[in-house]
Image (tube, helix red, strand yellow):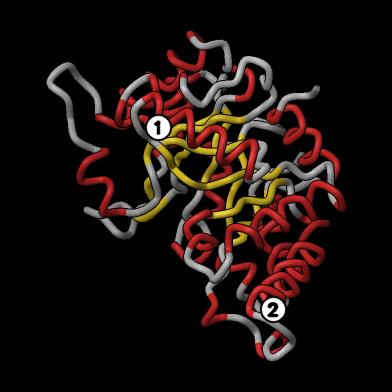
C-alpha cells in the first residue's frame, strides 16, 4: 500500500494545491441554512458534507481537530461518519487527525488503536514531550503507510515562551525536539511518512515590521527534507503565506498548509479554499 507522504504528494500534483482543509466545527457558527433540518447531528453532517464537497477540488488533505468533535453531542460518531465519507467519495485525499497525543507507552498504544482503528484516521500528530515512546507506541508494524507527525514549533505565540528556550548545550528547545523526531522516526523505521508540525511565518515579536520565518528554514536544515511539514497558522491566525511558502516549500509532499476557520466558516468555502490555493501558487507553491 502506498504511504501517506507519497499519497499526499500525488494529490498535490493532481490538483496543484498545498491546501489542507481543517474541519473544526463550532456549533454556534452553524450556518442558518442548515438549522432546523433535523437533529444536531444531522445538521452538522449536512454542513460538513457541504464543506467537504465544496472544497475537495482544492484540498490536498483533510484534517479533523478532534477536540472540536469531542465537544459536540455525539460528535465522535459524526466525525467517524465523515471520515468514512471522505474515504469513499474522495479516496485520493488523505485524512489526518489533529489530536496531539503524548503519554506513556501503554496509554499511547490505546490512542493508536482509538485513532487509527476506531476513528479511521490515516495520519495523526503527537506531542513528543514524554519521550521516544510517544512515537514508538503509535507504530503498528503491519501498517507502515500511516503518518506520524510530531510537534516542533507551533503557531501559537504563548508556546514560544517554552519552545524558544535556549539550552545550555546550544540551540533552542524546539530545535532539539525536531532533531529527536528525526532520530526516533529513523530508529523506529517510520521515516518515510514521518512529519513535523511547524507554525507559519509570522511577525517578529521584537520588531513587528519584520516577518519571522527563520524557524522554517532551520527546521529544514535539521531534518534535511526527510520529514514532511504540517504548517498551521495561516489564515485567521495571521501567518504570512508568501514567506511561509518561499521558506518551507521543496516540492510536492514537502509541506501542507492548513486553514480551518478561514474556509469552513466562509460564506463560500470553495471560493475561500481556491483563493488560499492561489495565494500559495503565486508565492511559488506550484506542484
Q: Secondary structure at mark 1?
A: helix
Farthest residue to the left: give it: 168
Q: Position of residue 184 (x, y in %)?
A: 44, 15
Q: Residue shown at 80%/40% (left/top)?
A: 11
Foreground: disc 2 or disc 1 = 1
In which quarter of the view is residue 267 placed?
A: bottom right
Q: Is residue 46 above or below residue 284?
A: below
Counting from the top left corner in percent of width and height, residue 89 is at: 87, 53
At horizontal 35% and vertical 54% (from top left) the residue drawn is: 156
Looking at the image, which residue is at 57% across and 11% down?
189
**Crowding at label 1, few (<14), some or many (≥20) Cα neighbours within 10 Å?**
some
The disc at residue 221 is none
Give the residue at mark 1. 107
Residue 84 drawn at (x, y percent): 77, 50
Residue at horizontal 84%, vertical 49%?
90
- Image quadrant for the N terminus? top right
Q: Is residue 225 above or below residue 212?
A: above
Label 2: which secondary element:
helix
**Nearest the eye: 136 or 62:** 136
Q: For mark 2, what is the residue?
A: 43
Disc 2 vs disc 1: Cβ atoms closer than 8 Å?
Answer: no
**Where 272 sits versus 168, above or below?**
below
**x, y percent for residue 271:** 75, 71
Distance between the Cα atoms at labels 2 and 1?
34 Å
Amino acid at each position: 500500500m502506498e504511504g501517506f507522504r507519497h499519497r499526499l504528494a500525488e494529490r498535490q500534483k493532481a490538483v496543484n494545491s498545498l491546501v489542507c482543509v481543517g474541519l473544526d466545527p463550532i456549533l454556534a457558527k452553524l450556518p442558518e441554512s442548515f438549522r432546523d433540518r433535523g437533529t444536531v447531528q444531522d445538521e452538522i453532517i449536512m454542513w460538513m458534507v457541504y464543506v467537504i464537497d465544496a472544497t475537495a477540488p482544492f484540498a490536498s488533505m483533510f484534517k479533523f481537530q478532534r477536540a472540536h468533535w469531542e465537544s459536540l453531542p455525539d460528535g465522535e460518531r459524526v466525525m467517524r461518519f465523515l471520515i468514512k465519507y471522505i474515504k469513499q467519495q474522495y479516496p485520493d485525499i488523505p485524512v489526518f487527525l489533529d489530536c496531539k497525543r503524548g503519554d506513556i507507552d501503554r496509554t499511547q498504544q490505546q490512542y493508536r488503536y482509538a485513532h487509527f482503528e476506531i476513528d479511521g484516521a490515516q495520519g495523526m500528530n503527537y506531542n513528543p514531550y514524554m519521550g521516544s515512546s510517544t512515537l514508538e507506541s503509535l507504530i503498528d508494524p503491519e501498517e507502515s503507510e500511516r503518518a506520524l507527525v510530531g510537534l516542533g514549533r507551533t503557531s501559537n505565540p504563548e508556546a514560544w515562551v517554552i519552545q524558544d528556550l535556549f539550552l545550555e548545550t546550544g540551540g533552542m528547545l524546539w530545535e532539539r525536539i525536531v532533531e529527536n523526531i528525526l532520530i526516533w522516526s529513523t530508529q523506529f523505521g517510520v521515516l518515510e511518512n514521518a512529519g513535523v508540525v511547524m507554525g507559519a511565518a509570522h511577525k517578529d515579536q521584537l520588531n513587528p515590521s519584520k516577518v519571522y520565518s527563520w524557524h522554517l528554514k532551520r527546521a529544514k536544515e535539521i531534518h534535511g527534507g526527510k520529514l514532511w511539514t504540517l504548517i498551521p497558522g495561516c489564515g485567521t491566525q495571521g501567518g504570512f503565506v508568501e514567506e511561509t511558502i518561499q521558506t518551507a516549500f521543496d516540492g510536492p509532499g514537502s509541506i501542507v498548509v492548513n486553514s480551518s476557520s478561514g474556509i469552513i466558516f466562509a460564506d463560500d468555502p470553495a471560493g475561500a479554499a481556491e483563493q488560499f490555493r492561489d495565494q500559495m501558487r503565486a508565492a511559488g507553491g506550484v506542484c
